[in-house]
Image (cartoon, grey):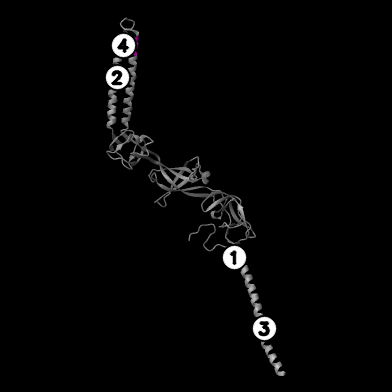
Amino acid sequence: MTEGKSRRSSVQFVVLPVVIAAIGFAAYGIWSRSTTLDRLKAVSEDAAVPRVQVVTPQRGPAEQALSLPGEVAAWNEAQIYGQVSGYVKHWYKDYGAKVETGELLADIDTPALDAEYKASQSALEVAQAKVNLAAITAKRFNQLSGTSAVTQQEIDDKNATLAEQKAELAQAQQQVDHFRAMLDFKRLRAPFAGIVAARRVNVGDFINAAGGNSSAQDRQRPPFTVADVHRLRVFVLVPQDFGSVLKPGLSAVLQPLGKPGQKIPAQFLTMAGAVDRASRTIVTEFVLDNPGNELMPGAYVNVDLKFPGDPSILVVPSQALLFRAEGAQVAVVDAQNRVHLQDIAVGLNFGLTIQVLSGLKPEDKIVANPSLGLLEGQLVKIVQPVPGYQPGVRNRS
């Protein structure tokens, strides 16, 4: 009996710690699993909260700058077409030649026109002879008026014949004057002082009189182009958003391509009174003196415009805007880190930034680069930008 009790006591002494240990391990496992699940749940819930970077609206600059492409044009430019048909007898001015008003550019040989002019002169001489004869005859008949030698009808006929011959003489004179005027077009002349921007003829080339007809100019290029470059015009297509700044006093700085660092001032001249429907831009014209021929017509230039800004108007990064069915919005983060989709009215677009006319306060915190999935009242978490990155600014990699 004593030996049996001793054996049971030994077994209990061995099993009891094992049971306790098993219960402890089971309890630890349950606690560990519960703790892990709670931690995972917390991590998941935290990960579900969108991370955002915020910026605050800034005051607009006192001066705004805008850079646009521009095209240089001559102060005056004329396409010199032929008004008579013939062959180029000689040309006198080549590309780039300086010319004065009325200076000869080329001579045209017009044998057909010369023959018509001589024929008109002969017709004028015949008409003059007929008038002389009719005048003598009418004078004689008028002297016999009141006698039985002639009747009044014959006298009236001779006077009418004289009037008819005088009319034919006037017509013949007009023909001579017409052909004489046409002969002046045998010489192509510069309409104003400038340079020869183009010469498209050689000796022997045929010049068609139809070149003077606007309906035919698309098919025939002008023999010469003369440009007045003492002053130049610069045409710029300005976006309609900036129409309010296009007024006298606006200045521009031109930067020609291929000449880095060179800056040429230009002054506002005028603007179109309408917006081009295709490009939604306003044709704007600037002018500048060109004494040293630094720029050439047809050249492409960068036009830097500067105009007064309005510091009272807030500006935000362009990428902070949301465009939805409600219109332009920004995502404002409140003190509880919840999103409020705020309607705003936008002003001028400066590229990287844009004016906000209403809907924001200077102390508002707005999401720098909101996603379209942001919802009203959604909880977000504000994070700091990574080193070297500024929210709301395009950073180069």
Q: Secondary structure at mark 1?
A: helix
The amino acid sitting under disc 1 is Ala
**Extreme-bottom residue of the structure:** 2
Callout 2 crowding tier (Cα within 10 Å): few <14, some 14–19, many ≥20: some
Residue placed most toward the observer, 290 or 152: 152
Can you identify the residue that label 4 sits on?
A: 139
Circles 2 and 4: CB distance less than 8 Å? no
Determine if the magenta segment contains residue 278: no
Can you identify the residue that label 1 sits on?
A: 47
Q: Marks 1 and 3, how far apart in space?
A: 41 Å
Task: Look at the image and tell me whether residue 101 can be seen.
Answer: no
The amino acid sitting under disc 4 is Lys
N-terminal of the pair, mark 3 or mark 2, is 3
Mark on residue 19?
3
Residue 288: x %, y % from top left: 43, 43
| Tag in front: 3 or 2 | 3
Q: Secondary structure at mark 2?
A: helix
Q: Quadrant of residue 174?
A: top left
Q: Marks 1 and 2, how far apart in space?
A: 111 Å
Q: Quadrant of residue 97?
A: top left
| Tag in front: 4 or 1 | 1
| Tag in front: 1 or 2 | 1
N-terminal of the pair, mark 1 or mark 3, is 3
Mark on residue 128?
2
N-terminal of the pair, mark 1 or mark 2, is 1
